[in-house]
């Protein structure tokens, strides 16, 4: 039954996106807010489909913590769910995304019209200055910037893997950061076709004001998000103990994968060093 419900949802999920992009075509010429409303509408439609088809509901907590105006929204990232739900809660948002996405027909056009931040990852070490420069323009307009501090989706229960880039952006931007915790990966795991019933909780935590030392901010951000996300996962497991093996498996696989990646990286440095000595 879960497979059938997931199949129906996945089909309608993408059909809804295509249908909305076609209906919204005139909005491409009406300013970024109109194009952003397409993203919010798709998010709301997707949440409705998840509820009605998969039995996957949503609970928002801490909405009173959302500051108005310019803010960095730093969210835990466990699922594709995170990407379409966040826009439903903010009036003038921007994502950081790969530059290649703007070349996609229709989808890329809306990204450009909504004035999202497209970055060229090929620039490597020059990426952060590029991002800081673009974000300053965005914050001057009182907009909200979404960022996933771990850089990619991590399974629910996996150890944290935060990147220091968010701390450098915080130091340069001088705007508050809104930490966001969630447990979405329990119900729509990353790279998974299957979607499970239950209640996804997304919690907006108290904002971190600008001005903290970089390292202090980085440690606080990680601690705030991880503590709250672990609590949300524990709540879900307490309500449905069958989730516990999934959390344990996610953690074990993530630890093994992280270890293998670290060993491969260390071996690469060793080969480079040996080549240099030769």
Image (spheres, grey):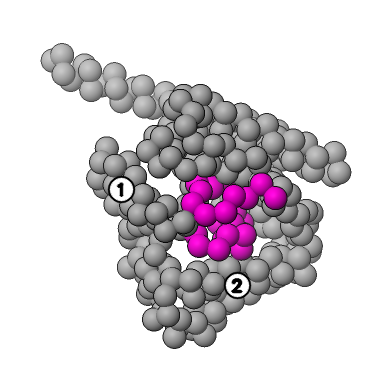
Quadrant position of residue 244 = top right
- Name the N-terminal-most of marks 1 and 2: 2
Please determine whether, in this image, residue 8 is positioned above or below residue 170.
below
Q: Could you tell me how far apart the alpha carbons at marks 1 and 2 are, in whole angstroms?
A: 30 Å
Quadrant position of residue 111 = bottom left
Residue 36 lies left or right of residue 240; in this view the side is left
Please determine whether, in this image, residue 34 is positioned above or below residue 245.
below
Could you say which is closer to the camera, residue 266 or residue 225?
225
Q: Is mark 1 on a helix, strand or loop?
A: helix
Please determine whether, in this image, residue 69 is positioned above or below residue 153.
below
The residue pinned by badge 1 equals: 133
Which quadrant is the C terminus positioned in?
Answer: top left
Say which residue appears at 79% left-offset and 54% top-offset: 198
Residue 175 position in % (x across, y down):
47, 43
Say which residue appears at 36% left-offset and 49% top-offset: 136
Could you say which is closer to the camera, residue 274 or residue 251?
251
Residue 44 position in % (x across, y down):
65, 68
Say which residue appears at 48% left-offset and 71% top-offset: 33
Residue 73 position in % (x across, y down):
54, 47
Q: Give the range drawn in magenta.
A: 64-93
The residue pinned by badge 2 equals: 41
Whether residue 34 appears in magenta in the rendering, the answer is no
Q: What element carries label 2?
A: helix
Which quadrant is the N terminus positioned in?
Answer: bottom right
Residue 189's tag is: none
Residue 276 position in % (x across, y down):
16, 18
Please determine whether, in this image, residue 22 is positioned above or below residue 153.
below
């Amino acid at each position: 039954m879960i497979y059938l419900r997931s199949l129906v949802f996945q089909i309608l999920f993408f059909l809804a996106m295509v249908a909305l992009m076609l209906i919204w075509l005139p909005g491409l010429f009406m300013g970024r807010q109109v194009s952003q409303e397409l993203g919010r509408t798709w998010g709301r439609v997707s949440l409705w489909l998840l509820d009605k088809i998969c039995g996957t509901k949503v609970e928002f907590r801490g909405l009173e913590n959302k500051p108005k105006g310019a803010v960095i929204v730093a969210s835990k990232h466990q699922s594709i769910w995170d990407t379409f739900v966040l826009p439903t809660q903010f009036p003038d948002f921007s994502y950081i995304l790969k530059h290649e996405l703007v070349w996609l027909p229709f989808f890329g056009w809306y990204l450009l019209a909504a004035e999202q931040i497209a970055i060229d990852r090929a620039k490597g070490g020059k990426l952060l200055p590029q991002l800081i420069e673009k974000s300053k323009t965005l914050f001057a307009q009182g907009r909200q910037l979404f960022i996933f501090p771990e850089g990619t989706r991590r399974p629910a229960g996996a150890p944290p893997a935060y990147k220091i880039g968010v701390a450098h952006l915080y130091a340069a931007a001088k705007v508050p950061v809104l930490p966001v915790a969630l447990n979405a990966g329990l119900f729509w795991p990353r790279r998974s076709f299957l979607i499970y019933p239950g209640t996804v909780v997304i919690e907006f935590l108290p904002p971190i004001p600008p001005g903290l030392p970089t390292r202090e901010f980085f440690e606080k951000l990680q601690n705030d998000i991880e503590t709250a996300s672990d609590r949300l996962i524990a709540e879900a497991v307490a309500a449905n103990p069958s989730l516990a093996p999934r959390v344990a498996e996610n953690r074990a696989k993530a630890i093994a994968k992280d270890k293998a990646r670290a060993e491969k990286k260390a071996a690469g440095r060793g080969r480079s060093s040996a080549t240099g000595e030769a």
